[in-house]
Amino acid sequence: MSAHVTAISLPRVQPAARPTFKGFVAAALRRMDLQRQRDRLALLDTRMLRDIGLSAEAAATEAARTVWNAPDHWQR
């Protein structure tokens, strides 16, 4: 009996990019900015929140999120 072997072509997987100091600093600055925005959001009164289309509950929920809880589009 002879076995017939078929070659399989697998896609090449690119290695993950190595983190850089510049990337680390950029991510840290984005998170600091996000925290600053959330701190300021917590200071807005009901009238100001209404002007930007947020309820007090939604603003309080967003302001209470941790700095590590960033928007999905930042996860790059």
Image (cartoon, rainbow, N blue to C red):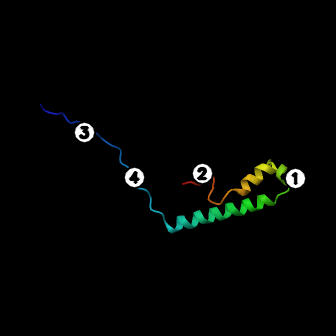
Q: Secondary structure at mark 4?
A: loop
What residue sits right under mark 3 in the picture? Answer: 7
Which residue type carries mark 3? Ala
Image vertical order of residue 51 relative to residue 2, above or below:
below
Image quadrant in which you'd find residue 39 = bottom right
Where does the image place residue 62, in percent across and percent down from the top left?
72, 53
3D distance between C-alphas at marks 4 and 1: 51 Å
Earlier-in-chain disc, 2 versus 4: 4
Position of 43 with respect to 2 (left or right) is: right
Q: Secondary structure at mark 3?
A: loop
3D distance between C-alphas at marks 3 and 2: 39 Å
Residue 73's tag is: 2
What residue sits right under mark 1 in the picture? Answer: 47
| Residue depicted at x 30% and y 41% | 9
| Closer to us: 39 or 11 | 39
What residue sits right under mark 4 in the picture? Answer: 14
3D distance between C-alphas at marks 3 and 1: 68 Å
